[in-house]
Image (cartoon, rainbow, N blue to C red):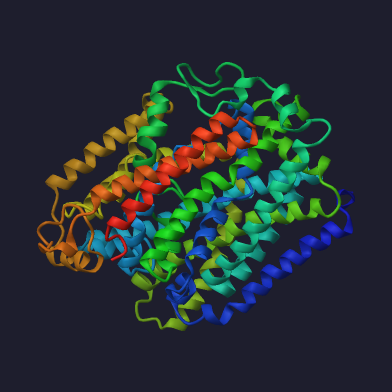
Amino acid sequence: MASMDLHWIDWAIIVLFLIFSLTIGLYFRKRASKNLESFFLGNRQMPWLIAGISMVATTFAADTPLAVTELVGTSGISGNWIWWSFLAGGMLTTFFFAKLWRRAGVLTETEFIELRYSGKAAATLRGFKAVYLGLVMNVLIIGWVNLAMITIIQEFFGLESQMTYLIVALAMVFAAFYTSLSGIWGVAVTDVVQFTLAIAGTIVLAVIVVNSEQVGGIEGLKGALPSSTFNFFPTLGGEGMGTGKTMAISLGAFLAYMGVQWWASWYPGQEPGGGGYVAQRMMSTKTEKGAVYATLFFQVAHYCLRPWPWILVALSCMVLYPELQGTDLKQGYVRAMKDFLPMGLKGLLLAAFLGAYLSTISTQLNWGAGYLANDLYKRFIAPEADSQKLVRASRTITFLLMICGLAVTTVMESISDVWAFVMECGAGLGLILILRWYWWRISAWSEISATVTPFVVFAISKFGFGLEFPNSFFFTVGVTTIVWILVTFLGPKEDEETLKVFFDRVNPDGNWRIFRKSSAANRNNIGRLIVCWLASVILTYSILFFTGKIIFKEWNEALMYGISVVVSGTVMVVFLKKTNVFN
């Protein structure tokens, strides 16, 4: 019997965690029921720390420790550059866009479209993106998170696929229930609890596994694996594996990851210019300063706090389960939970994984329902509906999204295939999402062309020319960029009155000279913000590598990165104080 793997104490911990999560949902029910702003943005009264932790918790899904384990199994520690490379885009959002999202005063990312653009093109784009992001992309994300949770349950309990699907379906019903009750406040507060439990559980697992007799601590780990496994940076030249376990990538792939991908491609949670649930959390904060602090905390915690416990367990699994090679190593993470965690801690970590899963699902349901309720139902179907009717519709949509997510899960076979599809079909859109804040000439038709073109070009590059990443990515980005530039200059301009309303409300930097008044209060901060951005990127990478060098007892390198932390952090703080970023 599967239940024999867990003691009753483990089950009690899991049940208590679920009861606590439901209690939070019930507690915030009244606060969420006033109107759409209370349901989806918490009346814009969320403390920045809660908003920041909620962002981190959402990105810590059930699939992330397994994905990192797989990366380490195929390419060593350096394999994590596949996602570490997104940091520049995340920090760009922190300093250039967080304050603007809070200042815009919109309810959703897609409502912003009709603040920035005008006419039928803007309305069409808003409606399309409400369905595309809130429904299509949303259920794809829910599907791959469900697949990861199914994998964990199957590996841990050895259950049949139908039973694991039923368990995940029940978990989704639970998430939809408390999300529909509590809105964003319940989601964010449970995120804080779930993330705390999840990060604590993964740290405990890492400490126990690394210090087990079979691994022998950090020294034993370093002695059992090729030294190249511990390289923090990939080698340039070739593809796939390098010497030992170091990631080796071509110059083209390196440029795609580090030089293009972070600003050119739309990807959930790492949207250029902000967007999705990240924008939702920024707009939920009390002040513009809170939006910046929340996003800065998110970026640092996302890249520096989360990965090392996963990496250490992944390295240990390479020693413990040598029969699991490459991508199969992700099974080792769950095996390590089964083999090394004692009574009580096993239930704690399972509750942590469940919490990670629920935090992602609840955010996706609430965020997606916001688009469909505010930007489809209210905007096009029931514009005269009162607040209570809109809240009821939001709760109904939450459950409908849950059903769609479960349906997609049954036909989805590969997480990596969905990742690749999402990445390629958003290639070239990113620069528009950045420039629409800083250049008045960007129009609704610019964004429409940049949204549609990647689908066509990706299909041509994939099935017509047989291109693979990164060549297909570069091709799609290049063609898409040419198309939207031509559309921008040859197509119609936006209504000047709409642009003026947008400028007066948001007061963005950049090329808005036709609306900008010549005064010190409106000085351009782009130069100072670029320094803050670059310093914050160096700071975050330095913290990440400083932590790693301390863990592996490489003291000279740790000192070097420690000095970099101090210098870059000082530069960031000094230049941030010199801007009027919070005014």
Give the position of the C terminus as an image quadrant: bottom left
Q: Residue at x 58, y 49 (%)?
A: 143
Position above or below: 391 against 399: below
Foreground of the two, 87 or 441: 87
> Where is residue 305 drawn, in percent x and y?
57, 47
- Which quadrant of the figure has residue 360? bottom right
Position above or below: 452 against 552: below
Foreground of the two, 113 or 401: 113
Residue 473 visible in this rendered orientation of the protein: yes
Position above or below: 27 against 248: below
Residue 448 visible in this rendered orientation of the protein: no
Q: Residue at x 75, y 25 (%)?
A: 322
Does residue 515 appear left or right of residue 159 in this picture? left
- Which quadrant of the figure has residue 407? bottom right
> Where is residue 167 drawn, in percent x and y?
73, 56
> Where is residue 397 drawn, in percent x and y?
51, 68
Does residue 506 appear left or right of residue 72 in this picture? left
Position above or below: 31 against 53: below
Q: Residue at x 50, y 59 (%)?
A: 52
Foreground of the two, 361 or 242: 242
Question: How many numbered marks does the figure carry?
Answer: 0
Q: Residue at x 76, y 55 (%)?
A: 348
Foreground of the two, 430 or 382: 430
> Where is residue 152 drawn, in percent x and y?
71, 45
